[in-house]
Image (cartoon, grey):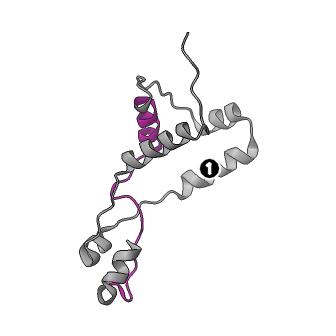
């Protein structure tokens, strides 16, 4: 998007663009995608916030999660599409899958061997 803004300087001047995915995905969607990436059937339960906080049992993590969820916004790339002819190279799901694959390849996450 930044490169296209440079290429289309006249259209970009004075405009505001959001460098985000073309589509949004909920945390539930991310969780399902992770299950499916590893070839598993999603098994997801929902908890009320107080129950989740108790389960996590870490005030700092709970506060970070709360503010991330409470402030989560939805942004659009329509202005960049219209003025710069911008299209993201990857979908949200492709980005998540590539990120997981990269973590696996670099050993940042490992899988338990099934017995």
Q: Say which residue label 1 marks.
A: 66
Q: Is residue 62 above or below residue 5?
A: above
Q: Name the outermost residue toward the top.
A: 115
Q: Is residue 54 left or right of residue 32?
A: right
Judging depth in this view, the residue of 41 and 49 nearest the camera is: 41
Give the position of the C terminus as an image quadrant: top right
Residue, x 38% and y 45% (percent of image)? 93
Using residue 109 as the reference point, say whether residue 12 is left or right of it: left
Return the x and y of residue 88 as percentages of the image width and height: 33, 61
Which residue is outermost to the front?
Answer: 105
Position above or below: 114 against 31:
above
Q: Residue at x 43, y 23 (%)?
A: 40
Looking at the rendering, which quadrant does residue 11 occupy?
Answer: bottom left
The answer to if 95 sits in the magenta stretch is no
Asked if residue 48 is positioned above or below residue 42 in the image, the reply reads below
- The residue segment tinted magenta is 12-36
* Quadrant placement of the N terminus: bottom left
Q: Position of residue 110 (x, y in %)?
A: 59, 30
Residue 84: x percent and y percent? Answer: 28, 76
User: Where, by quadrant of the figure, is residue 51 drawn?
Assistant: top right
Residue 24 is a magenta residue: yes
Give above or below for 56 relative to 93: above
Q: Nearer the viewer, residue 66 or 11?
A: 11
Q: Secondary structure at mark 1?
A: helix
Q: Residue at x 41, y 40 (%)?
A: 29
């Amino acid at each position: 998007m930044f490169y296209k803004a440079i290429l289309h300087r006249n259209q970009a001047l004075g405009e505001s663009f959001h460098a985000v995915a073309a589509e949004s995905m909920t945390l539930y969607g991310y969780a399902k995608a992770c299950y499916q990436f590893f070839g598993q059937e999603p098994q997801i339960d929902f908890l009320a916030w107080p129950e989740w906080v108790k389960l996590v049992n870490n005030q700092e993590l709970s506060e970070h999660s709360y503010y991330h969820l409470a402030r989560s916004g939805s942004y659009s790339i329509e202005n960049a599409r219209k003025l710069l002819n911008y299209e993201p190279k990857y979908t949200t799901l492709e980005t998540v899958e590539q990120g997981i694959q990269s973590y696996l390849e670099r050993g940042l996450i490992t899988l338990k061997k099934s017995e």
